[in-house]
Amino acid sequence: MRTKCKLSELPVGGKGVVEEIFEGGRGALQLREMGILPGTKIELIRVAPFGDPLEIRVRGYHLSLRSSEAEQVLISVD
């Protein structure tokens, strides 16, 4: 059974698949341009000491996202 959560709620080392990007935020287009699209596998690599930014692995490369951007990404996890 897969559960859904926001990328910002994923534990370090957690993996999932992007289900949806919420359109309300101003960074939704930027997230898509970085390759974060529905159906894409994603892994949370590390979180900075104060929770911002988050480092993720997507499509074979590493990205840093603000926690506010990670709030916009809904993922499904095993």
Image: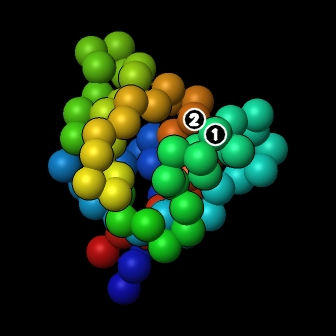
Q: In the drawing, what numbered circle is on residue 30?
A: 1
Q: Earlier in the sequence, mark 2 or mark 1?
A: 1
Asked which secondary structure carries label 2, the reply is: helix
The furthest residue to the bottom: 1
Task: Give the image location of residue 56, x and y in percent.
Answer: 32, 42
Hey, what amino acid is under mark 2? Glu
At label 2, counting other C-alpha atoms closer than 10 Å, the crowd grade (few under 14, some 14-19, many 20 or more) is: many
Hey, what amino acid is under mark 1? Gln
In the rendered image, the vertical position of residue 15 relative to residue 56, given as above or below: below
Q: Nearer the viewer, residue 24 or 60?
A: 60
Whether residues under marks 2 and 1 lie with C-beta atoms below 8 angstroms apart, the answer is: yes
Task: Give the image location of residue 51, x and y in percent.
Answer: 37, 22
Q: In the drawing, what numbered circle is on residue 76?
A: none
Q: Nearer the viewer, residue 35 or 55?
A: 35
In percent of the image, x 44 and y 66: which residue is there?
A: 40
In percent of the image, x 35 and y 53: which residue is there?
A: 58
